[in-house]
Amino acid sequence: MDDQDRPTSRALRFPSAFTILFGLIILVAAMTWIVPAGQYERIHSEALDRDVPVAGTYAAVEANPQGITDVLMAPIAGLYDPATNQANAIDVAVFVLVIGGFIGVVAATGAINAGIGGAMVALKGREKWMIPVLMAVFAFGGTTYGMAEETLAFYVLLIPIMLAARYDAVTAVAIILLGAGIGVLGSTVNAFATVIASEAAGVPFTKGLVLRLVILGLCWLVSVIYVMRYAEKVRQDPTKSLVYDMKAANEAHFLSAHQGDRIDFTLTHKLVLGIFGASFLIMVWGVVKGGWWMGEMSAFFLAAAILVGFVARSGEKNFVDAFVNGARDLLGVALIIGLARGIVVIMDAGRITDTVLHWAELSVGGLGEVAFINVMYWLQVLMSFFVPSSSGLAVLSMPIMAPVADFAGVGRDLVVTAFQSANGLVNLINPTFAVVMGALAIGRVPYERWLRFMAPLLLILTIIIMASLSIATLIA
């Protein structure tokens, strides 16, 4: 083939996640030179154990525009802020690296490939039913305790199974990211969204529970149907996959080169997979009941990796090599997490976060009930882009926006529901949300392909949420 006949890889190439996030950091830094700086007064809330803004106290403050040095420091401060000795996202990044090491040790034993082969034989003809079951499990985690960062541990487990079942990486990512995300969107007793937002709004978190259950059920059902239809289309015709051009590379990355050969499923393999599965169950228990977070989970998976090494008799050198190689595979994910957090760092340092909130407060004044709740929803969509953390946005916005609802004659519980639905929806695609970019990096799904996959579903989910909020407002 002549050089002139070769397809160029430079044509219309979408930028990588790193470029997108660094570009957003530059954009937000530029905004700090244009958007007026301002802040609300804050008081300490005993119920929330943190400072919350006070409605009606917004005032202009001295601008602090962010320059080149700040832009370069943002990814570093996104992980760890040397100025305040505050750990921002370094704990999540370390957790990702340890998970990578743990997966590397397990994979090196051959147990995963042997287990996948056995699972495919057992599930032959019924693989599609894994989708609703797993999405229900992840949605349960999302609606009860806001499962988000913890899901990063599951991608390397599920993706090889989906590929072996002749689906694609998009299907696997959707099962986890959409499953847990829909759960957060329809949070019921999620302490990091519903409970904190309700406390900040001054209403019981149980108020509005029926509406949230309706939103959760409808959005989960629609999402499951959407994912199952896409997965079956890919299974029937692999060229329909949004990542078909990456099929060979993904299979080479996630599956053994000899996946077609029969691998004996030995007692050691079974013990290793038993430890592997139990580790994730114990992690969930630790988060829900034991108060664990990233530090404890990282230490636990380090211990689990060592246990696997002993059971498999890996040997010191092989164990270390497998752990380091596994961590290296997820190093890019850890760096992406710092970049995503760096956007929030720039906004806060540039003193424009409260200004965006103040503009939102002014924009809903004088609206009718239905118009108010729908505008509130879209304002929360906008703010979620800049403040992806559900607990962070709840503490920031609810003390301001909930009292405004009183003047519109709208229940504060509806404002809470609008907030959590908007935040959950945006965080299904939000490039400033480290979980989204981390998941796509692990799954090797380009961001623009994920947007193409999600676009029709986002429209459907938006219609469901807005209709539910409007009907609930009218009958309240």
Image (cartoon, rainbow, N blue to C red):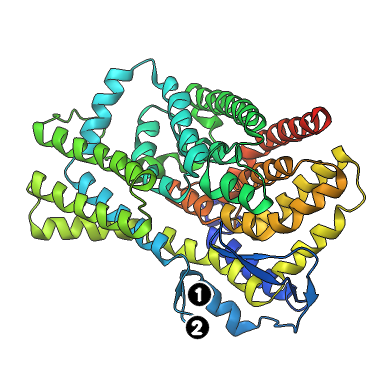
Is 282 rendered above or below residue 386? above
Q: Looking at the rendering, in which quadrant would you find the C terminus?
A: top right
Residue 404 horizontal/vertical position (percent): 81, 53
**Disc 2, SS:** loop
Residue 192 horizontal/vertical position (percent): 53, 50
Gap in angstroms between the C-alphas marked 2 and 1: 9 Å
User: What's the mark number on residue 83?
Assistant: 2
The answer to which of 356 and 365 lies nearer the viewer is 365
Question: Which sits earlier in the primary sequence, circle 2 or circle 1?
Answer: 1
User: What's the mark number on residue 19?
Assistant: none
Is 98 rendered above or below residue 164? below
Residue for point 53% across, 79% down = 73
Residue for point 62% across, 42% down = 204
Residue 351 can be seen in this image: yes
Badges 2 and 1: C-beta atoms under 8 Å apart?
yes
Residue for point 50% across, 52% down = 435
Residue 289 horizontal/vertical position (percent): 35, 44
Is 199 rendered above or below residue 170? below
Amino acid type of the residue that numbered disc 2 sits on in the rendered structure: Ala
Q: Which residue is mark 1?
A: 77
The answer to which of 433 and 214 lies nearer the viewer is 214
Residue for point 31% across, 41% down = 280
Amino acid type of the residue that numbered disc 1 sits on in the rendered structure: Ala
**Disc 1, SS:** helix
To which quarter of the image does residue 411 belong? top right
Give the mark toward the camera: 2 or 1: 2
Q: Pointer 2: residues within 10 angstroms few (<14), some, or many (20+)?
A: few
